[in-house]
Image (spheres, helix red, strand yellow):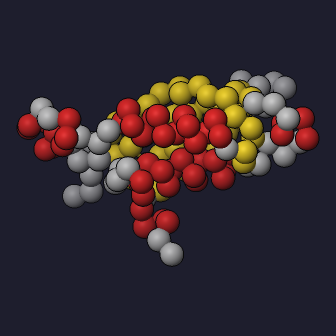
Amino acid sequence: MPVQDKILVKDLLLRGIIGLNEWEREKKQDILINLTLFTDMRAAGASDDAADALNYRAITKAIIAYVEASEHYLVEALATAIARLCVVDYGAARAIVRVEKPGALRFAHSVGVEIERTAADFEA
């Protein structure tokens, strides 16, 4: 049976360069990120040992550093880079990544994308 255990990171609000327009390339904007990370939590649940758990704090810190330094044109590309970080670099079995730009459209609270990836999606 596939792994169904989840870690949820909700409403991680960061600032970064993202967008196609010239003004979007000049100053950082708000970027809202939500993650669902799939991992098998049985060992951590039984042992109560952090060494047996997926380190969501380390993942989140890596995402913060990445987003603050990145300059993607598309939210799709940023979401893909974040998913790669989660599943390739940190070993989540699967990741659902939602990246939104609050206020990007005049009458909408935010606009964004949601993707789902596994490590197999990044194999050459």
Query: Which residue appears at 52% of the width and 44% of the height?
Result: 97
Q: Is residue 86 left or right of residue 52?
A: right
User: What is the quadrant of residue 87 in the picture?
Assistant: bottom left
Q: Quadrant of residue 59?
A: top left
Inspect this view and state whether residue 59 appears: yes
| Front in this rendered view, residue 66 or 95 | 66
Instruction: Give the image location of residue 2, x and y in percent.
Output: 27, 56
| 120 left or right of 30 in image | left
60 over 42 or under it: above or below: above
> Which residue sits at x=29%, y=42%?
54
Q: Residue at x 14, y 35 (%)?
A: 49
In this view, the residue farthest toward the left is 46
Where does the image place residue 112, in percent across and percent down from the top left? 67, 39
Residue 100 visible in the displayed image: no
In the drawing, does residue 113 fall left or right of residue 56? right
The image quarter in which residue 7 lies: top left
Residue found at x 44% / y 31% = 9
Q: Position of residue 100 (x, y in %)?
A: 65, 35
Q: Is residue 116 left or right of residue 67?
A: left
Q: Residue furthest right?
A: 22
Question: Considering the image in quadrants, where does the N terminus appear?
Answer: bottom left
Residue 94, x across and y down, in percent: 39, 52
